[in-house]
Image: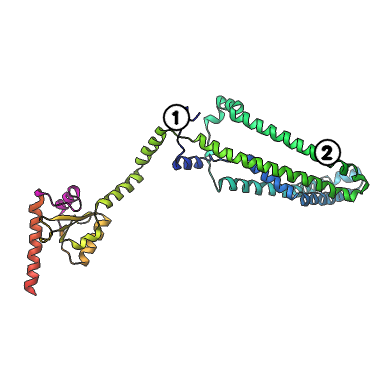
C-alpha cells in the first residue's frame, strides 16, 4: 500500500517525534497482558492464601449474628459495611498488581509518555465509514484471527494439562481436605506459569510486528520529505539560527582584529576591522566584520590592543553590506578610507613628537 502511494521512504526523525507527541507509538497489548498474567501466576499461591484467610475471617464475623432473622435485620447496616470492607480488602492486591504491571508494561515498550492528544474530539472517531473499516478492515480481521488462535491454544493447553494430571485430581480425595488446597494451587500455578510463558513469546512477537506496522504506516514519499524540509526551512527560529551561523562563518576570524590598522564602527551594531600595511597590502583590506555581540567583542579587543576605533556610520554599514573578509576596499570607498588612515597616521606622528 505504501509503495502504491509512492511512500517508499523511512519516516524522518521529525515525523517520528510528531507521531510520539500525538500518542502514536508502537505498543503491544498482548505483551502488557502477558506481563500482568505472568506476575499473577508467580504470586498465585500468596494471593490464594490471602483470599482464603480473609474469607474465613469474613464468614466467622457473619456467623456471629446467629440464626435469628430479626437480629440479622437490626445488624443489616453492619453486615453491609463488613461486606464492602471485605470486598475492598480482597480486591486491593489484585488492583495494585494490575496497575503496577500495566504501568511497567507500557514503560518497557514506549518509555515515559504523557499526551492529551487522544482526548481531543475528532470527527474520524465518530465517522461511521472509519468505524466500519476499523471493525471489518484487515487489521481488525488480523486481530480477530490472532485472538482466536490464542483462545484455541490456551484451551488446548489447559485441557492437555488437566488430562496429564487426571490421576492426581482423581486420587486427591484420599489425601484429605487439608492437602487438596496446596495440590490444586500447585496444579493451577504450573498451568498459569506455562500459559504466561506462551503469552510472553506471543506478546514479544506482536510487539515487533507493531513496531514494523507503525513505521510502515508512517512511511513518507519523496514529496513529503521535501515538504517537511521546506517547512523546517520556513521556521523563523531555524532560519535565524542558520543565518547567524552563516554570518559568523563569513565574518572571518575575530582574532584577526589584532592585526588591523583601524576599527570602523556604527558604533554599536557594526564593526569592520581594516588593515593597511604597506609591506603586505597594495590597498586596504577588510580583515573581519561583525554585528551586535561580535561587534562588541571586536571593540573590546581593539581597546585592549590600543587599535584606533573610528565611528563612521554610513561607511560601516556600506563596508558590512558590500565587502567580505579578506577582500580589498572598493574603489568608491578609497577616499573615505584614505581620510581615516590619514587621521590615524597624523595621530601616531603626534605621539612620537610628544615622546
Residue at screen point 67% across, 46% down = 35
Q: Where is residue 113 in the image (x, y as percent from the top left)?
A: 54, 46
Query: Vertical placement of 331 versus 257: above or below?
Result: above
Q: How crowded is mark 2: few (under 14 residues within 10 Å), some or many (20 or more)?
A: few
Whether residue 339 is in magenta: the answer is no
Q: How crowded is mark 1: few (under 14 residues within 10 Å), some or many (20 or more)?
A: some
Q: Where is residue 36 in the image (x, y as percent from the top left)?
A: 68, 45
Q: Which of 268 and 295 is in front in this view?
A: 295
Q: Position of residue 346 (x, y in %)?
A: 7, 65
Residue at screen point 77% across, 52% down = 46
Question: Which image quadrant is residue 191 in?
Answer: top right
- Spatial distance from mark 2 to mark 1, Cα to Cα? 55 Å
Please say whether residue 21 is visible from this viewpoint. yes
Query: Vertical placement of 164 versus 131: above or below?
Result: below
Q: In this view, does 13 lie to the left or right of 198?
A: left
N-term-proximal mark, 2 vs 1: 1
- Find numbered disc 1 in the image and state the secondary structure of the residue it sits on: loop
Q: Are marks 2 and 1 in contact (CB under 8 Å)?
A: no
Please say whether residue 28 is visible from this viewpoint. no
Q: In this view, does 82 lie to the left or right of 290?
A: right
- Find numbered disc 2 in the image and state the secondary structure of the residue it sits on: helix
Which residue is labeled 2 in the image? 163
Which residue is labeled 1 in the image? 6
Q: For the C terminus, give its image quadrant.
A: bottom left
Range drawn in magenta: 311-331
Q: Which of 256 and 322 is in front in this view?
A: 256
Q: In this view, does 118 lie to the left or right of 241?
A: right
Q: Count the marks: how many?
A: 2
Amino acid at each position: 500500500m505504501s509503495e502504491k502511494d509512492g511512500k517508499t521512504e523511512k519516516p524522518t526523525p521529525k515525523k517520528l517525534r510528531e507521531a510520539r507527541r500525538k500518542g502514536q507509538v508502537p505498543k503491544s497489548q498482548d505483551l502488557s497482558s502477558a506481563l500482568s498474567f505472568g506476575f499473577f501466576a508467580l504470586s498465585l499461591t500468596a494471593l490464594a492464601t490471602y483470599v482464603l484467610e480473609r474469607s474465613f475471617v469474613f464468614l466467622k464475623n457473619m456467623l456471629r449474628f446467629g440464626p435469628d432473622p430479626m437480629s440479622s435485620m437490626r445488624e443489616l447496616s453492619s453486615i453491609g459495611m463488613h461486606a464492602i470492607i471485605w470486598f475492598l480488602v480482597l480486591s486491593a492486591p489484585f488492583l495494585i498488581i494490575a496497575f503496577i504491571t500495566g504501568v511497567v508494561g507500557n514503560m518497557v515498550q514506549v518509555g515515559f509518555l504523557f499526551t492529551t492528544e487522544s482526548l481531543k474530539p475528532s470527527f474520524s472517531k465518530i465517522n461511521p465509514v472509519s468505524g466500519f473499516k476499523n471493525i471489518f478492515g484487515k487489521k481488525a480481521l488480523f486481530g480477530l484471527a490472532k485472538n482466536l488462535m490464542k483462545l484455541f491454544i490456551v484451551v488446548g493447553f489447559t485441557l492437555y494439562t488437566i488430562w496429564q494430571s487426571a490421576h492426581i485430581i482423581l486420587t486427591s480425595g484420599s489425601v484429605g481436605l487439608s492437602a487438596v488446597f496446596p495440590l490444586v494451587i500447585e496444579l493451577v500455578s504450573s498451568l498459569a506459569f506455562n500459559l504466561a510463558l506462551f503469552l510472553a513469546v506471543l506478546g514479544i512477537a506482536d510487539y515487533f510486528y507493531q513496531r514494523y506496522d507503525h513505521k510502515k504506516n508512517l512511511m513518507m514519499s519523496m514529496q513529503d520529505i521535501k515538504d517537511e524540509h521546506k517547512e523546517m526551512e520556513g521556521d523563523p527560529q531555524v532560519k535565524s539560527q542558520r543565518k547567524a551561523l552563516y554570518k559568523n562563518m563569513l565574518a572571518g576570524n575575530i582574532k584577526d582584529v589584532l592585526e588591523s590598522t583601524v576599527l570602523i564602527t556604527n558604533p554599536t551594531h557594526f564593526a569592520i576591522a581594516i588593515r593597511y600595511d604597506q609591506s603586505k597590502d597594495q590597498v586596504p583590506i577588510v580583515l573581519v566584520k561583525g554585528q551586535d555581540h561580535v561587534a562588541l567583542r571586536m571593540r573590546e579587543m581593539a581597546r585592549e590592543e590600543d587599535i584606533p576605533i573610528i565611528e563612521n556610520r554610513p561607511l560601516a554599514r556600506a563596508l558590512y553590506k558590500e565587502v567580505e573578509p579578506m577582500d580589498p576596499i572598493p574603489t568608491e570607498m578609497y577616499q573615505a578610507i584614505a581620510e581615516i588612515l590619514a587621521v590615524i597616521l597624523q595621530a601616531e606622528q603626534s605621539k612620537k613628537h610628544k615622546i
